[in-house]
Image: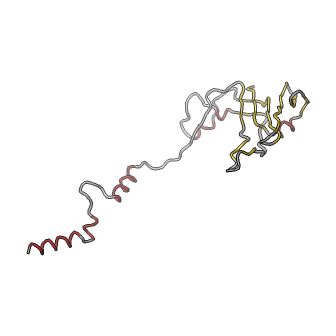
Amino acid sequence: EGEGEGAEGDAEAGSPGAEEEEEEGVPSAADRRACDAEARPPRQPAVKLVQLERLPPVLTLHLKRFSAGGGRGAAKVSAKVPFPLELQLGPYCSAQAPPESLSDLGSPGGGGARYELSGVVEHQGSLSGGHYTAFVRAGSSWYHMSDSHVSEADEEAVLGAQASLLFYVQV
């Protein structure tokens, strides 16, 4: 008889119902997922906000003109990058207090956030060789400078430059 009871007990332990039993006090994976879903707050729209607190008198922007060539070494980026003669940074400046809602994001906070382009440095040539030149504004005139040679330039030439560095002066 003792052997028969043991055989019955072994049969019950091998039944499908016995495999699904979990350790007492440990929630099942399904229970944990349901609990996580209930504990999570509902999703809300998010906004990533970057604002400037203080503006410099001269704003220098460096444009990345070289890239990793994907196994072929570095390569020069020759694509035209448009840039304006004037920048208005007011919308990107912080107000006295952080915005309370999304509708507050349009209100500029920084006075004196207007900049005018005053210089452009460009690289002419390739990665293996070339030459740096500059366009510089003096008053209302533009000049192109290359080593010891200086010539007058127009805005079209300035805006057509393959800029590496842009210099904006606060007005």
Residue 149 percent location from the top left of the image: 90, 28
Identify the image quadrant of residue 157.
top right
Give the answer, above or below, for where 8 lies relative to 49: below
Write down the quadrant of residue 168 in the picture. top right
39 vs 61: above or below: below
Image height of 97 relative to 76, above or below: above
Side (left or right) of 107 relative to 166: left
Residue that lies at the very extreme toward the left in this rendered image: 1
* Quadrant of the rendered image containing residue 50: top right
Quarter of the figure with the N terminus: bottom left
Quadrant location of the C terminus in the rendered image:
top right
Q: How many marks?
A: 0
Could you say where residue 9 lies in the image, as x and y percent from the top left? Answer: 17, 70
| Residue drawn 22% across the image and 69% down it | 13
Q: Residue 16, how many percent across, how many down?
A: 27, 71
In front of the other: 1 or 95: 1
At x 71%, y 45%, the residue is 74
Give the side of residue 44 with respect to residue 136, left or right.
left
User: Which residue sits at x=69%, y=29%?
Assistant: 113
User: Nearest the camera: 62 or 156?
Assistant: 62
Q: How is the image coloured?
A: secondary structure
Q: Residue at x 20, y 71 (%)?
A: 12
